[in-house]
C-alpha cells in the first residue's frame, strides 16, 4: 500500500467535497502498454462459498494499475537505484524463528501451521510512505512483511511453484482504505498526476469511509517496530476442501510494554531502535489468526473490520528474533532485493478478496520492474 505525501495537501478541500456526498467518477487516464513483459500468471479464480465475488473488469484494471505504478517507479528512480513503490523505507530485515504453537485445534492445523514446527524466517519492517527519505517521526503507516523459509509444497504463483517460501504481509492498522478496483485506479491516477486539481479528486475516489481509513492508517507514530501491532487487513483462506475457512492475521509484541517515543528522535530512529534491541537481547512477537465467525464479515470489502468481540484472535505461533547484527551493507542489499507478495503461498493459505487478487498481478509486475531496473537477480531465498 502506498501513501503519497502530496495526498495530504488536497485533503482539507477534498474531504469537504467528499462529505457533500459526491459520487464515484470513472477512471480517466488513457494508459500506455506495459514495458515489462507480463508473466504467465493467471488471474485468480474466486471461491463463492467463502464469500468471494468478482468486480467488473478486475483483470484489465489490475494490469492498468501495474502500468500506472510502473510509470511512477520509473519516474521516481534512476536505473540502478529503484526502490519499492510502496514501503520503500526499510528499518531493516531481521532473521527470525517462526515457532508454531505446540497444540492447535484441527481447524487451525492447516498448511504450514503444524503444531510444534519451527521455521526460519526473514522479517522486513518498513514505513508506508512512498518517500524513502521520510523521517521516522513523521506520521505514517508501518509495515511488517514475514517470509517464512523451508515451507514444502507446491505454491500458488505459476512462475514460482517450487519456491519454499510463505509470505505474510501486514500493516499496523486493521483495515485497508479501498476496495472497488475502478475507484482505486482513479485514486492512483489522481495521486500520480502532475496536475494539482487532480489531487483534489482523491477523496472522491476513496469516498468518506476510505478517506477516513487512509488518514487513520497513515497517522501512527511508533517507538519500536518490534512492539507495534500489525494486521493482514485483508482475508486469506485457511485449509482446503470442505473444512476451509476465511481468516485474517495479526502480529504483536509478546509483552504489552511499549517504549516511549524518543525525546530527540533521529531521522531513522526506528532502525536505531531495532538495532539496539537486538544488540542487547532477543525479541518476541506473537502471530495470531482470526477465523471468520459469520457471513456478515465481508471477504471482499477490505474496509470492513472483523471485530475482535465477534471474531477473536488465537495464537498460532511465537516469532523469536534472536540477537543479531542486521544493519550491514550486504544484508540491506539482500533485503531490498527480496520480493514479498501474499501470493508466495501454499494453496491452503490462498489470498482472498479483490484487493488480494489485484495484488497478484501488481506485486509481481512491480517486483520485476524494480529488479530489471537494478539489474538484480529475482529469486526466492
Ligand atoms: C490493491 C491494493 C494494493 C496495492 C496496489 C499495493 C501495492 C504495493 C506495491 C507495488 C508494493 C511493492 C512491491 C515490490 O516492489 O516488491 C507493495 C508493498 C507492500 N504492501 Fe502493498 N499494495 C496494496 C495493498 C496492500 C495491503 C492490503 C497491505 C496490507 C497488509 C499492503 C502492505 C504492503 C507492505 C507491508 C509492503 C512492503 C512489503 C515489503 O516489505 O517488501 N499492501 N504494495
Image (spheres, helix red, strand yellow):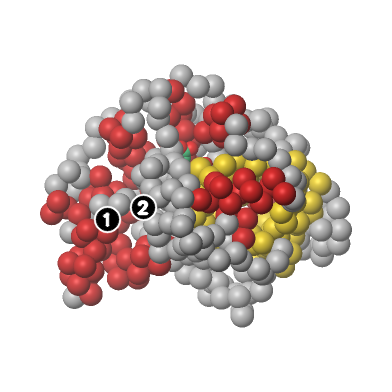
The answer to whether the beta carbon of the residue marked 2 is less than 8 Å from any atom of ligand 1 is no
Return the x and y of residue 199 as percentages of the image width and height.
20, 54
- 190 and 375: which is toward the camera: 375
Label placed on residue 7: 1
Whether residue 69 is visible here, answered yes or no, is yes
Q: Are marks 1 and 2 in contact (CB under 8 Å)?
A: yes
Return the x and y of residue 20 as percentages of the image width and height.
18, 75
Label placed on residue 3: 2
Relative vertical location of residue 365 with respect to residue 216 in this rendering, above or below: above
Give SS at disc 2: loop
Q: Residue at x 49, y 29 (%)?
A: 40
Return the x and y of residue 60 as percentages of the image width and height.
34, 42
Return the x and y of residue 53 as percentages of the image width and height.
47, 58
Give SS at disc 1: helix
Q: Residue at x 22, y 58 (%)?
A: 9
Relative vertical location of residue 341 with respect to residue 378 in this rendering, above or below: below
Amino acid at each position: 500500500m502506498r501513501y503519497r505525501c502530496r495526498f495530504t495537501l488536497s485533503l482539507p478541500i477534498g474531504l469537504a467535497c467528499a462529505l457533500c456526498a459526491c459520487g464515484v467518477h470513472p477512471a480517466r487516464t488513457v494508459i500506455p502498454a506495459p514495458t515489462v513483459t507480463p508473466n504467465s500468471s493467471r488471474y485468480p479464480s474466486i471461491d463463492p462459498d467463502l464469500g468471494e465475488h468478482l468486480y467488473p473488469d478486475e483483470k484489465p484494471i489490475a494490469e492498468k494499475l501495474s502500468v500506472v505504478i510502473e510509470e511512477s517507479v520509473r519516474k521516481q528512480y534512476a536505473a540502478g537505484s529503484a526502490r519499492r513503490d510502496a514501503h520503500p523505507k526499510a528499518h531493516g530485515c531481521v532473521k527470525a524463528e517462526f515457532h508454531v504453537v505446540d497444540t492447535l485445534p484441527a481447524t487451525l492445523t492447516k498448511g504450514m501451521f503444524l503444531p510444534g514446527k519451527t521455521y526460519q524466517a526473514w522479517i522486513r519492517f518498513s514505513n508506508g510512505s512512498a518517500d524513502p527519505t521520510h523521517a521516522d517521526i513523521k506520521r505514517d503507516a508501518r509495515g511488517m512483511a514475514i517470509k517464512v523459509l523451508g515451507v514444502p509444497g507446491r505454491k500458488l504463483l505459476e512462475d514460482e511453484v517450487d519456491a519454499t517460501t510463505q509470505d505474510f504481509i501486514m500493516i499496523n492498522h486493521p483495515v485497508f482504505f479501498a476496495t472497488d478496483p475502478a475507484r482505486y485506479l482513479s485514486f492512483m491516477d489522481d495521486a500520480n498526476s502532475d496536475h494539482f486539481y487532480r489531487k483534489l479528486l482523491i477523496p472522491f475516489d476513496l469516498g468518506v469511509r476510505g478517506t477516513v481509513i487512509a488518514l487513520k492508517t497513515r497517522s501512527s507514530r511508533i517507538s519500536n517496530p518490534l512492539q507495534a501491532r500489525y494486521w493482514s487487513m485483508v482475508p486469506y483462506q485457511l485449509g482446503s476442501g470442505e473444512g476451509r475457512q476465511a481468516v485474517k492475521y495479526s502480529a504483536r509484541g509478546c509483552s504489552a510494554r511499549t517504549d516511549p517515543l524518543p525525546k530527540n528522535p533521529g531521522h531513522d530512529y526506528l532502525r536505531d531502535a531495532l538495532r539496539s534491541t537486538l544488540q542487547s537481547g532477543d525479541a518476541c512477537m506473537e502471530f495470531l489468526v482470526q477465523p471468520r465467525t459469520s457471513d456478515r464479515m465481508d471477504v471482499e470489502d477490505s474496509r470492513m473490520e472483523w471485530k475482535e468481540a465477534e471474531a477473536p484472535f488465537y495464537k498460532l505461533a511465537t516469532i523469536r528474533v534472536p540477537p543479531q547484527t542486521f544493519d550491514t551493507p550486504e544484508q540491506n542489499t539482500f533485503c531490498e532485493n527480496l520480493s514479498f507478495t501474499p501470493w508466495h503461498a501454499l494453496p491452503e493459505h490462498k489470498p482472498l478478496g479483490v484487493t488480494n487478487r489485484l495484488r497478484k498481478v501488481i506485486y509481481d509486475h512491480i517486483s520485476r520492474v524494480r529488479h530489471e531496473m537494478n539489474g538484480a537477480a529475482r529469486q526466492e531465498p
